[in-house]
Image: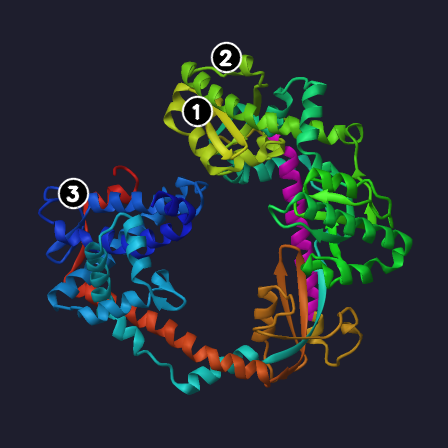
Amino acid sequence: MFDFIRTNQRFMMFILLVLVLPSFVLIGFSGYTNYVSGDKELVKVGDSAVTLQEFEMARRNQLEQLQRSAMGRFDPEVLNTRPAREMLLESLVDRRVLVDVATAERFSVSDAALRNEIAQMPEFQENGNFSAERYNQLLAASGLSARDFEQGQRGELALRRVLGPVGGSAVLPEPVVQSIVAALTEERTVRLQTFPVSEQLKDIVVSDADIQAWYEANKESLTVPDQVAVQYLLLDEEVAVQSVGEISETDLQAYYEQNKARYVTPPRVNVSHIQVSVAPGASQEEREAARAKAESIAQRVKAEPARFAEIAREESQDVGSARDGGQLGWVRPGSWPAVLEQAVFALQEGGISDVVAGPDGFHVFLANQVEAERGESFQEAREQVETEVRRQLASERFAELAMRLTDLVYDNPNSLEPAAQELGLEPRTVAGVTRNNLLDADIVGNQAAAASADAAIFEDPRVRSTLFSASLLQEKANSGVIEISPDTLVVVRVAAFEPAHVPPLEQVKGLVESTLVAERAQEATIQAGEKALAALRDSAADSDLSDGFGDAMTVSRIDDQGLAKAVLDAVFAADPNALPAYVGVEGPQGYAVARVEAVKAGEGETKELLAAGLAMELARTWGMAEEAAVLQQMRQRLGVSRTSDAEAVLAGEEG
């Protein structure tokens, strides 16, 4: 069973998280009111409540799910925000509302409906049909009984019946669908004239006074968050390879011989034969007679080699090969008895052997083709051999180093030096690691983690989360061994902590200057673009004012031809009854003026395909909106109100 779980981890995660947890984590709480009596109530829902215990359990499950799906690389801080906590609490309230309504209105699910629902789940099917064996196997592997799982699914189906009919009955009128299709497929022919910011940069000059004024007005935007300088030890494949000492020539030679097939293609012979068989237990006279016949055949084929195949068909008693003129195909060393191989591999191409006695009679061989041994000698392959041996030894060495590193870090919790000295690892230091990202080198200097060769390690949220844990941040303790990948381990400790602050102007003067130049260049670009736009709109005739435009392109809302969304929105906001129409849009790269020259209704296959699928998608979206509206009415009817404890939890003050 455990082998099944290990080899089907993603599938098992899907079963546990998607099928089981919604029922047990969220629905199941409603049956434990007495058990959690005395627990803090966060939100009152009618006569029941969502409690702190439920919320904390849901948070733990949510984090575990995301960690599993991200293979351990999910940053827990993403959930440690008020919006994330608010969303989770609201989802628990919605579920509680549905549970209360389903209970009060006595929503139920028949056994037949439950069986049909489970039978339709693809996880339990084989070749498109429900498999009882697979069903039982998966439930057993996840530690669930059929009864518990089916109860959870029954509750989930009951909840679907509260809002399911609302969403399922939502239909948009055909004229509405057609109007949306028409809007999405409408085509407009446009030309663009761009005003890049880069053209203005060379003319922008800022003074020290300008820089000082900008700095004073925008200090908050320059705030550098809490950051740490990090001392760390890195154990990876390269370190393990370097730790392997000299490898003796004898060991390299032995490895070459053991793996010779990887470096050398052995010789082979394409051979034919004529066989005179000797039955098991034959007398000496019978063996002599068979040998005499083989000798006679050998003399004949040596005299007329070109007739070997013909004679083989007539004389050979190996029925299988006789019909093919004695052809046996290619033979490599080690595939035949030694006595036969010795005779075959002694032949030159086209050569015919003397009579050779074998286990099943006497043979006469013809070497049709001969290929000698090919490949690299030991000396020719030595460099590759040494690399392979070193990597194999390094793999074993890596495991030893990893185990020893774990012990040393544990035995010396406040220093990396003992581990570094014993294992021959070089302590490294980087700076500018924050809870959420890595600071640029222009902020923290040459030791910036973002500019180091190991930047990927500190981009891993597990490493940053560990660095900002209490034991490392406050006690300056070593972390445990963190596995970045199967062949990369790291141990970190906080060398220094720097709280959030605004850097002095001297430190960020270059950044402020470049920002100020960019801002002024953007302003100048917008002014130039708007001036050109005004001139185009004021022009009575369509004259040379449009010469700066590029080639015409036809765009639609579903085929933007690479236009930025802001430009596309402006193009379709232009009045189609006053063409050509000119619109201007500013963006981070500058300013663009679009000339709308023609408008055409969409048609053809694209429009038909879109109309076919859009009605269903719009109905589904409309249904979701209807469900949300009905759910809101249910909340109002039951009465939903937060307590002061809820505000504390949402603010992160407790829980």
Q: Is residue 527 visible?
A: no
Q: Quadrant of the rendered structure where residue 390 is?
A: top right
18 drawn magenta? no
Q: Is residue 549 above or below residue 474?
A: below
The reply, left or right, for residue 129 in relation to residue 525 is: left
Mark number, residue 418: 2
Q: Check disc 3 and give the amino acid type.
A: Lys
Nearest to the observer: residue 342 or residue 372: 342
Alpha-carbon distance for marks 2 and 3?
48 Å
What secondary structure predominates along the stretch shown in magenta?
helix
Tell me, yes or no, whether the two marked residues, 2 and 3, touch with CB atoms within 8 Å.
Answer: no
Q: What type is the residue that disc 1 sits on?
A: Ser
Give the spatial CA distance, label 3 vs label 1: 35 Å
Q: State yes or no: residue 529 in magenta.
A: yes
Residue density around tag 3, few if under 14, some if 14–19, many if 20 or more, within 10 Å: some
- The image shows residue 367 at horizontal and vertical percentages of 82, 49
How many other residues sit within 10 Å of disc 1, few (<14), some (14-19) or many (≥20)?
A: many
Q: Which residue shows up at 39% across the image and 29% down it?
A: 469
**Mark 2 to mark 1: distance in Å?**
14 Å
* Residue plotted at (52% across, 40% down): 221
Q: Which residues are magenta?
A: 505-534
Please, what secondary structure does the residue beneath circle 3 have?
A: loop
Tell me the number on the disc at residue 30. none
In this view, the residue in front, 351 or 74, is: 351
Q: In the picture shown, does residue 341 fall above or below 161?
A: above
Give how far across and how far down residue 628 sits, in percent: 29, 67
Q: Residue beneath label 1, please?
A: 479
| Three-letter code for the amino acid on which mark 2 is drawn | Pro
Q: Badge 2 local density, few (<14 within 10 Å), some, or many (20+)?
A: some
Of badges 2 and 1, nearer the viewer stands: 2
Q: Nearer the viewer, mark 2 or mark 3?
A: 2
